Image (cartoon, rainbow, N blue to C red):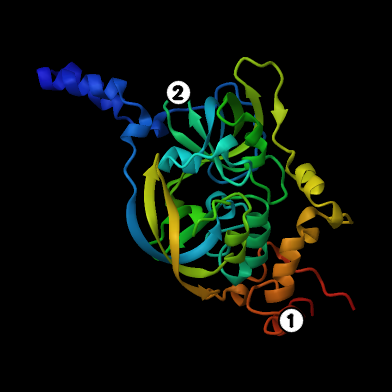
Amino acid sequence: MKRIILILALLAAPAAAQDFSAGSGAKTWNLYAEKPARFEAKVVDILCELTGDCPENCGDGRRQLGLLRAADKALVYPNKNAQAAFTGAALELLPYCSADVEVDGLLIEDPDLAAKNIYLVQKIRLVGEENWTKANSWTKKWAKANPDAKGKGPWFRRDPRVRAAIAEDGYTGIGVEAEQPFIKELFE
Amino acid sequence: MRNIFTLLGLALTLPATALAAEGKRIQIKGEMIDTWCYFSGVMGGPDAVIGSAHHTCALWCSAGGIPVGLLGEDGQVYMVLKIEGDDGSAGGNTQLSLASHEITADGIYYERDGLKYIVVEKIVADHGITNLNHEDYGPVPGFAIPEPKK
């Protein structure tokens, strides 16, 4: 009876007890709660996974994509790609929709902030494939989708939607006129 | 004994999705935040990466496809997957228009592997930007506001 209870307890053990750092070549971002993590997973549409609302091709880039980890079936949420440019991971994973992949990156788990299974993906490859693909294509895809936004500076200074939002409500969102005293003081 | 073996058998054969909690209706009041800056601490503590101090960065991150979350009054982050029929959770227009806003959302709540999720069916109220913390923290990150051209 004790053995059976032990087996049941092990089955119920949380995935947090597992370490996925073996073999990882992930580069540090010097984040407080980061841990290198390399693992195999299936790329899934998170909304589909949770609700059964499943469009073609994981939503064609509209939706956030998740990693259903092979080792424990935990749903890992890639929030970030490998670029230090305010860019997400969905477009990096989209070519692998529904495929079994191996990823390498940083896992963020911070109980103080209820951060659990948050991931920064740095490299992706199909299971069994030799070559890795770096998860750093977001800005190139943005440039292709925004040919009229060419110019100097990073994408986020030139993005038409961001520029329109700032033109309407200011950098703080409180209104262009309302924030003028704050901005004036900031640069005095 | 037979019951225990039945339970053991079920635990071994049920897929993870079947073990996930069913969605349930909730109403949450909170701020629409960018989750990466909040969870990672890449730009400082959690109080500095919300509100008007972080508004420009929230726009950048939302447009850049970083997941948006609803930071509820209960202190929990609800990862937003859909807003009033718009499933553009990776850079969509609806979530971009709500960056840093405090909203009251009615929707379906899910929990999976330690994270909370919400499918917002209706924005009951949009209270606008109510956390005016830019005077306290300045712009976060510091370069969010470029120096005005003279």
Q: Give the Cα separation between the discs numbered 1 and 2.
A: 54 Å
- Please identify the residue farthest to the front as the structure is shown: A56
Is disc 2 surrounded by few (<14), some (14 to 19) or many (20+) residues within 10 Å?
A: few
Residue A130: x, y in percent? Answer: 69, 16
Of residues A82 and B44, which is closer to you in this image? A82
Q: Name the chain letter of the residue that bears numbered label 2.
A: A
Q: Is residue B123 above or below residue A126?
A: below
Who's the residue at 74% across and 81% down the image? A185
Quadrant of the drawing holding the C terminus of chain B:
bottom right
Front residue (pair B105, B3): B105
Taking A137 as reference, is B20 left or right? left
Identify the residue under disc 1: A185
**Residue A176, picture quadrant:** bottom right
| Residue at 82% across, 72% down | B147
> Foreground residue, A8 or B9?
B9
Q: Residues within 10 Å of mark 1 (few under 14, many from 20)?
A: few
Q: Position of residue A27 (x, y in %)?
A: 67, 34
Mark 1 element type: helix
For label 2, the SS is loop
Q: Residue at x 47, y 40 (%)?
A: A48
Q: Is residue B2 above or below residue B34?
A: above
Is residue A174 visible in the rendered image? The answer is yes
- Is A59 on the left or on the right of A73, as rendered? right
- The circle on residue A124 is none
Mark 1 chain:
A
> Which amino acid is tagged 2?
Ala
Name the residue beneath numbered marker 2: A71
Residue sitting nearer the eye, A135 or A9: A135
Amino acid at the residue labelled 1: Glu
Q: Position of residue A124 (x, y in %)?
A: 65, 28
